[in-house]
Image: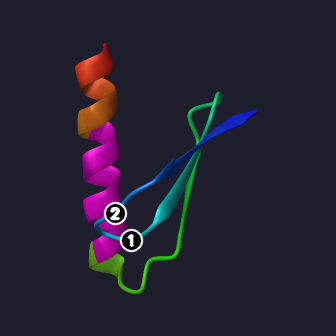
Amino acid sequence: PGLIYRLDYPKVVCLIFGSGKMVITGARAKAEILEAVQFIQDELADLL
């Protein structure tokens, strides 16, 4: 089972699985991927 997390900016979709793995789709550039990863890491850190 995984969580589907849709970001408005960058416009990507993150699939986050219970194993800790993450798949990011919809990015047009590597910079968008890095920005999305940083955003997700910050959000998860706030929860802990």
Q: Main secondary structure of the magenta part?
A: helix
Decide: is 22 above or below 20. Answer: below
Q: Quarter of the image containing the C terminus? A: top left
Disc assigned to residue 28: none
Residue contact at pointers 2 and 1, CB within 8 angstroms: yes
Q: Is residue 5 left or right of residue 11?
A: right
Q: Which residue is mark 2?
A: 8
Quote the CA–CA distance across marks 2 and 1: 5 Å
Query: Residue at horizontal 34%, vertical 29%?
Result: 44
Give the residue furthest to the right: 1
Q: Amino acid at mark 1?
A: Lys
Name above or below for residue 45 compared with residue 7.
above
- Residue 2, horizontal then vertical, whole percent: 68, 37
Pointer 1: what residue? 11
Quarter of the view holding residue 17 = top right
Q: Position of residue 20 (x, y in %)?
A: 56, 33
Q: Mark 1, residues whose alpha carbon is within 10 Å: few (<14), some, or many (≥20)?
A: some
Q: Residue at x 26, y 48 (%)?
A: 39
Which residue occupies the foreground of this view, 33 or 7? 7
Is 36 magenta? The answer is yes
Chain part drawn in magenta: 32-41
Locate residue 21 relative to residue 35 in the image: left or right. right
Query: Tag 1's secondary structure?
Result: loop
The furthest residue to the front: 8
Which image quadrant is residue 19 in? top right
Is 25 magenta? The answer is no
User: What residue appears at the point 30 percent right and 64 percent down from the top-left corner?
Assistant: 34
Query: Which sits in the foreground, 8 or 28?
Result: 8
Tell me what residue is drawn at x 35 percent, y 79 percent: 30
Q: Amino acid at mark 2?
A: Asp
Q: How packed is label 2: few (under 14 Cα within 10 Å), some, or many (20 or more)?
A: few
Outermost residue on the bottom side: it is 28
